[in-house]
Image: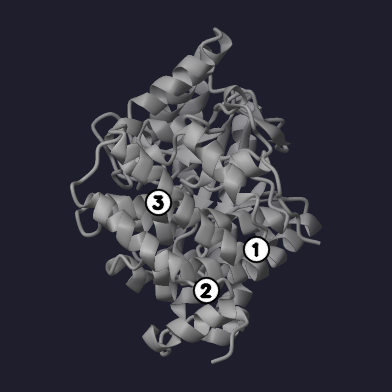
Amino acid sequence: MAKKFDKLAINNLDDFIYGTCPNPVTTKSGMVIGGGTVYPEINFTLPGMDVNDQTIDKALSIYSNIIDGVLKRAAELYAPGVLVEFETVPDFTEHPQYGIDANRILLNGIKEAADKYGLKAALRTTPNDLREMSRPPVMRGGKYWDTMLELYEQCAKDGSDFLSIESTGGKEINDEALVKADIRKAIFAMGVLGCRDMEYLWGNLVKLSDANGCFAAGDSACGFANTAMVLAEKGFIPHVFAAVMRVVAVPRALVAFEQGAVGPSKDCAYEGPYLKAITGSPIAMEGKTAAGAHLSPVGNIAAAVADTWSNESIQQVKLLSEMAPVVGMEQLVYDCRLMNVAKEKGQGLMMRDLLVESDAPLDVQAWVLRPDVVLKIAGGLVKEQDNFLRTKLAAKLTINELRDAIKAEKVKADRRDMKWLDKMEKAVDKIPDDPEQFYAEIKPELDMDKWHPEGYGLKA
């Protein structure tokens, strides 16, 4: 039975703060995520290299060196705990044994660090969504689905604390929507296709996690709203469109929690504050310390209500001081140390507000992450229980919020942004409330060679 979130888990702005949430999660090592402390979440990947039978031993040795290096540095800096994320490269998911072996190396490194340093650590395993490797993607079966589940299941059995994914259901349509800044098509991609795929995907992942003593953590709109953010940063689409896309991604991400995910949500899910407000679950966030992976206009505000603080990803390459993941680990530890000490000294809300005010007035994408704005919009979203209608509502509420903020000169905006808000509002208002009717209306505009409607419970 799917959960329903019809009221906010956090109503009071003073309770909406980093490191603390109503429903914390305790790892095997005893870290309580959301229990009062912000933990660093370190993410890393291989340097540019092919992964195959001839190179896999080298790749595995690189992961061994990474985990030893980052946990040693975390211990030297007295980190209270570390969440390690293993995002697989596609080859590691397509050939599950590669991923299983790498995951075991990380688990062993965590155990050795506990024995050697007394360091608490946990592992989040995040296989990439292989389903999009088929063209068109096959969403509910086939070899890529089977290999994904094989990797998930064995990693859970081996001892991973959390399972996550950056799923891609609806991306076949959303990619075109982003390039054209087409809010109508984006709502179809996420509100109809994405939400339906999330129900199927996360229904399976939660069952698998529960059966193997692992937490189903959460998903990310990385290929949707984050892509919009990157395109906006490069000047290809309006920032205001990317800001609306950020909140439009919330209902889709929420489906994972409706199916039984418990957090922490994925670091690159900047929709996390909305998920925390609605579900009370802990969230991972990333910002300034993820600049090695991508640039963003939300470097400080992203930390305002984070429960783990991540660097997104960084390659194992040598910098002047050390290998890049070790450098990333140090940066994260210091970020978290400052936030935690501020909280211990009774200045947590002050710290949160400084993180917010240093970004929010400068970009509309930061504005929609303001804790007060999050509570306001999230409070509206929980009044609607249908995922498609909730996605439409997310667009409407965000458009109204941004229009008011721009009119009041509370946030910087491009001179064309008001026109874009009006354009998006008109497009959203024309979308029917029945998803089947919407599908019938928009179908002539869709490239039917790029996707299988049956994979989303729709007729071709």
Residue 414 location, x and y as percent? 20, 46
Q: Image check: 109 left or right of 50?
A: right
Residue hosting label 2: 432
Residue hosting label 1: 386
Q: Residue, x 61% and y 54% (percent of image)?
A: 254
Q: Secondary structure at mark 2?
A: loop
| Amino acid type of the residue tagged 1 in the rendering | Asp
User: Disc 2 to disc 1, how far (Cα)?
Assistant: 13 Å
Q: Nearer the viewer, residue 167 or 54?
A: 167
Q: Is residue 116 above or below residue 454?
A: above
Give neighbour class at mark 2: few <14, some 14-19, many 20+ (Cα, 10 Å). Answer: some
Tell me whether circle 2 and circle 3 mark residues in contact (CB < 8 Å): no
Q: Residue, x 40% and y 84% (percent of image)?
A: 446
Q: Secondary structure at mark 1?
A: loop
State which quadrant residue 444 falls in: bottom left
Give neighbour class at mark 1: few <14, some 14-19, many 20+ (Cα, 10 Å). Answer: few
Q: Which mark is residue 399?
A: 3
Q: Nearer the viewer, residue 95 or 406?
A: 406
The answer to whether residue 108 is visible is no
Q: Nearer the viewer, residue 63 or 277?
A: 277
Residue 429 location, x and y as percent? 44, 66
Residue 257 location, x and y as percent? 67, 53
Give neighbour class at mark 3: few <14, some 14-19, many 20+ (Cα, 10 Å). Answer: many
Q: Residue, x 40% and y 51% (percent of image)?
A: 399
User: Farthest residue toward the bottom?
Assistant: 460
User: Disc 1 to disc 3, how far (Cα)?
Assistant: 20 Å
Residue 413 location, x and y as percent? 24, 42
Q: Nearer the viewer, residue 181 or 433?
A: 433
Front: mark 1 or 3: 3
